[in-house]
Image (spheres, grey):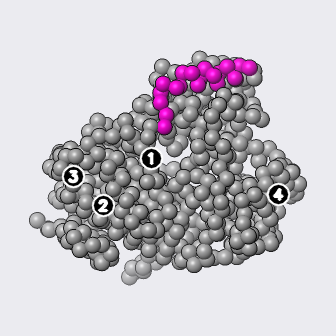
Amino acid sequence: MYQSFAMTTSPATGASRLAALRAELSARGLDGFLVPRADAHQGEYVAPHDERLSWLTGFTGSAGTCAVLPDAAGVFIDGRYTLQVRGQIDLTQFTPVPWTGTEVAPWIAEHLAKGVIGFDPWLHTPREIAELRRVLSPDVTLQAVADNPLDAVWADQPAAPSAAIATHPLNLSGEASADKRARLAADLMDRNATAAVLSLPDSIAWLLNIRGADIARTPVALLFAILHADGSVDLFNAADRADDALRDHLGPDVRLHGMDTFAQQLDALDGTIALDQSSAPMWIADRLDTTIDFEPVRLPKARKNPAEIEGSRTAHRRDAAAMAQFLHWLDEQAPSGTLTEIAIAQQLESYRQATNQLRDISFETISGSGANGAIVHYRVTEESDRTLSSGELMLVDSGGQYLDGTTDITRTIAVGPVDPDAAKAFTLVLRGMIAISHLRWPAGLGGAHLDALARAPLWSAGMDYAHGTGHGVGAYLGVHEGPQSLSRRSTVPFEPGNILSNEPGYYREGAFGIRIENLLVVQDASNIAGGDAAMLGFETLTLVPIDRRLIVLHLLSAEERDWLNRYHSRVYAEIGPLVPPATREWLKAACAPLSED
């Protein structure tokens, strides 16, 4: 099993660890310290070595920060984690602070009138530190520290990862690394930049057509790189783990180094250097004299080429066959009243593993029954595991990492008769998902322009959800990929080749959670007679039935019903031949057209 269900943290350790950190801060003359859920690469997943936030507080979410002051310790979380955080931290020592209501700097100003707050410059970005300094009063100083004081009190901190680096084949990447480097180097020259410093592991993996295993769930190596305007690259943290095959793949224009020379080579850079102020470590920015705020890889990486798109289609068909077998199994076993959330997650992973092509799950499977489904990023553990009962909803959000693509799918399943309010909410969520799926829009628009369409059916009933409608997805890379997203905050225009999730939801605390998620790829829309604007649209990649038993039919328009019928017809046509006969019969029933009555 890729997923473990052991409880990795406990609120009981918070008091002693917080006291030890405060003692270390006092010895260093610091009045506070910032502990982000981050590593030097600002990725969603971090290695055990970098799990500082969870070690200190017990909170295991994928985003958050703890501001430790002499008499207060605030744990800042977004809307996905408002329920989770309260069950994981010691509320006598730490205070949950919703990020949507209070930012870090104003909270610090409220709790500290004067003093020095330390931060690790490897774990914070220039933009983040600049914003904090802008808001904090002159009497509160932010000070970079050379050695992280939390590491000094973390006695059994795991070692930093150093896994082997693998090559990614051309038939799946779709473009040779040398061609990518030449194309991006030309972009640097057009911007009068002599080089770009890259700190995002997925950007480096895409640029060099390599993959790694330094962190769970995302197949990347934790590397740094300097892309020069002549197309050559200096690659750091790679020299000691590159075999002959990797060196041959990279070629002579990619020079391999240890981390011990990184500072020296940064200091030697001349001219204007491209650096992403929102993802690069402050430590790098402090070593560069003249920079422009630019990351040359993220946008090209997000525009999937034909080979990457075809690979994603193949991966999704394979994954859909595994999902169909899982849903068939769940329908047969759920009425027994013996299934637990862990057993459900294990069974789903076993179907993916049976493909013999699964490299990892793409994130921890969210297997939430009943009220646990209302915890947006719920992670079932041996302590929280509960048995699925009749009359409940079961929310399963999961995905796989395959060499040819990354998948992410959520289905909400009825177990026996369900509350009419839950069925109504499910239907409203479905209407929002369909609205995005068949949307056409003018080129140049981003997620902020489209996000409201997914929410409109819920809004009409006085409901909403506290997360974005969708995120970018990589090609055998991160399951969450920028810069584009389907959310209120993103104005990055969608472009053909972008892969996005479409996952509206609704969560009623203490009762149930609903989310329906498909992955989509942006494509040029066909012309409409009389139309004169360039339009874009979506192709749906995910091919798994949506639970018809939860649909309140009269709430669907004829157009929405027709979309769902066409979708289910396609699911059965493409996935039916890939599953065993018994599952094929189940799939046929699950994909039966909705009647007009």
Any mark on residue 398, and which? Answer: none
**Secondary structure found at label 3:** helix
- Nearest the camera: 558 or 478? 478
Compare marks 2 and 4 and give the one earlier in the sequence.
4
Compare marks 1 and 3 and give the one earlier in the sequence.
1
Compare marks 4 and 1 and give the one earlier in the sequence.
1
Residue type, mark 1 in image: Ser
Image location (x, y in percent) of residue 460: 28, 48
In the image, farthest residue toward the left: 597
For marks 4 and 1, give the CA distance: 46 Å
Residue at left offset 88%, top offset 57%: 270
Question: Which residue carries the number 1 mark?
Answer: 4
Corner quadrant of residue 234: bottom right
Pointer 2 and pointer 3: residues touching (CB < 8 Å)? Answer: no
Image location (x, y in percent) of residue 296: 69, 62
Q: Is residue 555 visible?
A: no
Question: Which residue carries the number 3 mark?
Answer: 334
Q: Nearer the viewer, mark 1 or mark 2?
A: 1
Q: Nearer the viewer, mark 2 or mark 4?
A: 2
Residue type, mark 4 in image: Thr
